[in-house]
Structure formats: C-alpha cells, structure tokens
Image (tube, rainbow, N blue to C red):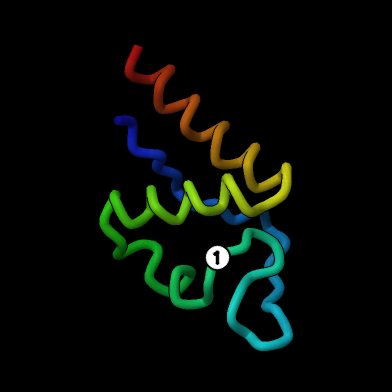
C-alpha cells in the first residue's frame, strides 16, 4: 500500500475554529499541526487519508498533487 505523504496539507488559509481545536483551512487538529514535523510517516498518512475524505477540493488537490509528484520522481 502506498503511504500518502505530504510536506504539509496546509493550504495557507490558517484560521482556528471558534473552539481552537481545528484549522478551518486544512482541517487538521491543533495537536496535529503542532506535531506534524515529528509525526511518523504512518501518522501523517492517517491524517492525509482523513483529510481526503472530510475536506474540500483545495485540501484534496494539495495532498494529491504532492503524492503525484512523489510517484513521478520515483519513475
């Protein structure tokens, strides 16, 4: 199975929800944003899969674009 890795799923529309728990731009939880760089690849994959299912077109496009680039680099 391919691991969906991205440098970040951030789309540059950073704004926390009123309860400060989630980014309204990319959909990541505050804890995921803080620990993103130290997460294991499998943890990032799990977050990316959740975002692909729950977030809008901009986030999905960002994630899939980076994954496509990684496939192109391997070819």
Q: Quadrant of residue 12?
A: bottom right
Identify the residue shown where x is 63% and y is 53%.
54
Give the image location of residue 24, x and y in percent.
70, 68
Sort mark 1 into few (<14), some (14-19) or many (20+) by Cα contacts within 10 Å.
Answer: many
Split into 4 quadrants, where in the image is the C terminus? Answer: top left
Q: Quadrant of residue 63?
A: top right
Identify the residue shown where x is 59% and y is 81%.
21
- Whether residue 48 sits left or right of residue 17 in the image: it is left
Split into 4 quadrants, where in the image is the N terminus? Answer: top left
Position of residue 67 relative to residue 35, above or below, is above
Q: Residue furthest front?
A: 53
State the residue position of label 1. Answer: 28
Identify the residue shown where x is 33% and y is 18%.
74
Please state the total of marks drawn on the protein image: 1
Front in this rendered view, residue 37 or 58: 58
Position of residue 45 relative to residue 69, above or below, is below
- Label 1 secondary element: loop
Give the image location of residue 19, x and y in percent.
67, 88
- Whether residue 28 sits left or right of residue 20 in the image: it is left
Position of residue 30 relative to residue 39, above or below, is below
Identify the residue shown where x is 52% and y is 76%.
30
Q: Residue furthest top?
A: 75
Give the image location of residue 70, x and y in percent.
41, 27
- Whether residue 71 sits left or right of residue 9 in the image: it is left
């Amino acid at each position: 199975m391919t691991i969906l890795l991205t440098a970040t799923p951030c789309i540059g529309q950073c704004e926390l929800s009123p309860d400060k728990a989630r980014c309204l731009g990319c959909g990541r939880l505050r804890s995921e944003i803080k620990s993103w760089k130290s997460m294991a690849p499998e943890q990032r994959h799990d977050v990316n899969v959740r975002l692909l299912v729950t977030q809008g077109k901009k986030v999905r496009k960002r994630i899939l674009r980076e994954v496509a680039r990684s496939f192109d680099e391997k070819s």
